[in-house]
Amino acid sequence: MTDLNIRRHELKYYISNTEYYALVNRLVNILDPDRHSIPHKGYFIRSLYFDSHDDESLVEKLSGIQFRRKYRMRIYSLNTEIVKFEIKNKWNNQIFKETATISRESAIRIIDGHHDELLQYNNPILNKIYSKFTKGAFSPRVIIDYTRDAFIYDFFNLRITIDKDPRSNNTDLDLFSEDIHTVPVILEDKQILEIKYESCLPEYIQRILQLDAFERSAISKYTLGRRFLKINSWEDN
């Protein structure tokens, strides 16, 4: 199956529900919606994150390590037969994604701990994941569900997304389950704005986005989802 490597800068912001609606109303007049996305409706995403026996990825994020990696499976429909398996590498504000696709059956076997399933594809990305998973005793940690509005501008390889109502489950890790009970990962009424671009973010796009009005933060849906109980709004920072 195919594999894909993507390098971009990445900026993340918390925005309020009011800011979300205003932003989408501006973007629909300037950028093209992603072909899977309907403005104000978006499309479904489910990610299943893996981590080592000693929570290597989580510790790297919480410790502020500049270069770090996360490993996840991702689907866009619970009935899909194709699953993305991705390594997300991050260095400061730059990201480098290595993505391969596997079958639904392979995903189920890998989730169950049969990491040798990765080797049947003879894919360099999946071979890298196999080596990491076997050495670090990686296993599934959390499922994150959310709805994404997405806009693109091909000239600058620009992609703007708003991830709405992210929710998590730390105990039921069936990637294809229709009956997962999820809880919000953000306590306040906020959504997550992500801006990804290849070389530069044009000034007129910055003006349109009105970024100075938003709350920039080093947001990690994986880290947010790993918290079993949140009792204070400051825990969303």
Image: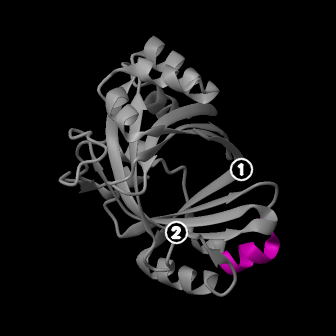
- Residue indicated by mark 2: 36
Which residue has dot 1 on it? 8
Instruction: Kindly identify the residue that appears in the image at 22 percent across and 46 percent down.
Output: 229
Q: Is residue 77 above or below residue 143?
A: below
Q: Which mark is residue 46?
A: none
* Of callouts 1 and 2, the N-terminal one: 1
| Magenta: main secondary structure | helix
Q: Amino acid at mark 1?
A: Arg
Against 46, is 117 above or below?
A: above
x 35%, y 70%: residue: 189
Residue 130 position, x and y percent, is: 50, 20
Q: Position of residue 111 (x, y in %)?
A: 33, 30
Instruction: Name the residue: 51% across, 20% down.
Output: 119
User: Quarter holding the N terminus?
Assistant: top right
Q: Which residues are magenta?
A: 201-209
- In this view, the residue in front, 134 or 195, is 134
